[in-house]
Image (cartoon, grey):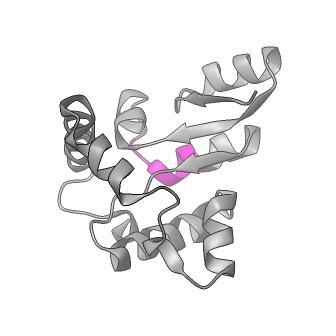
Amino acid sequence: MEFMLDTADLAAIEYWNDHLQLSGITTNPTILKKAAAVNVFDRLRAIRKIIGMHVQVVGESAEEMVKDAARILQEVDYMAPYFNRMVNQNVGAQAVTVGIDVVASAFANPAISAAVAGFAQDWQDLHPGKHVYDL
């Protein structure tokens, strides 16, 4: 079993990394906002010094998602393995690893829809009018 923490709290990451066999960290705009990570890339670099991580892009189109991912890679010098596999297969960020029926069903769930809307709002609260690639 793999353990991944959903946090950008550096003290928590260090503590749990010392006490569990963590596989990595996942982040998204809501998690970064909760950790008061005003400079997103500084926080991501700090996390990366401790352990590997998955970072959610915020672009709405495939082109924006790829630009976000490229900027994260440029700033943090790390990208989650699933992104690398997609690039190596020359399919880009348009690839989905689950069936569309699963995705549609998940996003039809009010709790998930609310979380996705919350991610978008939290990103705008942190960086009004900007995408990851604009930073």
What's the residue at 34%, 36% (across, down)? 30
Q: What is the span of residues highlighted in magenta in the rendered image?
A: 38-44
Q: Residue at x 28, y 44 (%)?
A: 105
**In the image, is 108 to the left or to the right of 14?**
left
In the depicted structure, whether residue 93 falls above or below residue 5: below
**Where is residue 101 drawn, in percent x and y?**
34, 53
Residue 62 falls in image quadrant:
bottom left
- Of residues 63 and 86, which is closer to you in this image? 86
Report the number of discs.
0
Q: Is residue 80 above or below residue 44?
A: below
| Near-viewer residue (90 or 35) | 90
Q: Nearer the viewer, residue 90 or 60?
A: 90
Residue 126 seen by the camera? no
Question: In percent of the image, x 62 and y 19: which residue is there?
Answer: 12
Q: Position of residue 123 (x, y in %)?
A: 28, 47
Q: Residue 8 magenta-drawn?
A: no
**Quadrant of the rendered image containing residue 22:** top right
40 in the magenta segment: yes
